Image (spheres, rainbow, N blue to C red):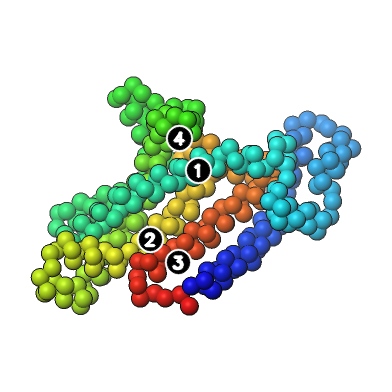
Amino acid sequence: MTTYVIGRLLLMIPTLLGVAILTFVIMRVVPGDVVALRYAQGAVPQEVIDKERAQLGLDRPMYVQFTDFMTGIVRLDFGQSLWTDRPVMDEIGGRFGISLELAILATLIATSLAVPLGVLAAVKQDTWVDYVIRVVSIGGLALPSFWLGIMTILLLVVIFQWAPPLIFKPFWEDPKENLAQLIWPALAVGYRYSAVATRMTRSSVLEVLREDYVRTARAKGLREVLVIVRHALRNSLLPVVTVISLEFAFLFGGLVVTEQVFNVNGLGKLIVDAVAHRDYPLVQALVLIFSFVFVFVNFIVDLLYGVLDPRIRYA
């Protein structure tokens, strides 16, 4: 087990290194830079633009810039933002907690909806209960989360004459104000992603219910609840956990439009602004963080496989 964990952790290094190289090259292949964007609206002498590029280090050879970038990663120093001139970690730190909390809330909502509904649909296969749950899940797949967010805000304003707060308050400072702002985007996004997990749970549980050991458990006289929970659900959780984990990794930085609808300044909105401003250090740092989250979540899920299924052994 220890050897497997160490090997997986070491494999993260070449993966993240490849992401760093690819991001560095792509950002510099795209035409234009932050200096050209700053002075795009006015007639500025070329010597002023060249001086600005020299101050930001954009005139140096590519290999020198890449060496400085990789050296900074080793020291956990991603440099200064080219657009705001603030440290990159300060720019990210102010929004990291927002995206993390929103992803956790949305994942909890999606899981709490998907697992019970998926199991119920499998147990009540081809009944009206199954059809209702399938319609609800298909609706979640068909309706964009940002549209659900807009409808949610309209209903809150029109019916209850209340709108979510516009200013973010950390949970430890004001839990009520914090949840009043983030629970609505979490519901809109969580419902959509619960639809995927619901359909996966239903399919997986249906497959397990046809296995011989489930029929044996029923023949031994076990209560149906124990058969479903202890034998069917646990053995069908592997694909469900995989889907939910991938959704969490995506939710961490992929809610650009939803964040805009609910005025939530998370990492998704930040990376779009950084790309638009050609803010190389900020984009590179954000892409590396998103990649690390994906890789680390997959690593945790692989370890959970051994907990959920005793037949899996890591050697």
Give the residue type at disc 3.
Answer: Asp
Tell me the distance, in whole angstroms, between the alpha carbons under discs 4 and 2: 27 Å
Precedes in sequence: disc 4 or disc 1:
1
Q: Position of residue 58 (x, y in %)?
A: 81, 47
Give the residue type at disc 1.
Answer: Ser
Query: Which residue is labeled 4 in the image?
Result: 171
Precedes in sequence: disc 3 or disc 1:
1
The local secondary structure at tag 1 comes to helix
Give the residue type at disc 2.
Answer: Val
Give the residue type at disc 4.
Answer: Phe
Tell me the distance, in whole angstroms, between the alpha carbons under discs 1 and 2: 21 Å
- Which mark, residue 156? none
Q: Alpha-carbon neighbours of circle 2 within 10 Å: few (<14), some, or many (≥20)?
A: many
Tell me the distance, in whole angstroms, between the alpha carbons under discs 4 and 1: 13 Å
Query: Which residue is labeled 3 in the image?
Result: 302
The local secondary structure at tag 2 comes to helix
The local secondary structure at tag 3 comes to helix
Tell me the distance, in whole angstroms, between the alpha carbons under discs 3 and 4: 31 Å
Precedes in sequence: disc 2 or disc 3:
2
Tell me if 144 is positioned left or right of 28 in this view. left
Precedes in sequence: disc 1 or disc 2:
1
Q: Position of residue 23 (x, y in %)?
A: 66, 56
Q: Nearer the viewer, mark 3 or mark 1?
A: 3
Query: Which residue is labeled 2 in the image?
Result: 241
Query: Which residue is labeled 1 in the image?
Result: 99
The residue most toward the right is 47
Residue at 22% across, 62% down: 229
**Residue 246 visible here:** yes
Q: Alpha-carbon neighbours of circle 4 within 10 Å: few (<14), some, or many (≥20)?
A: some
- Most foreground residue, 257 or 245: 245
Precedes in sequence: disc 4 or disc 2:
4
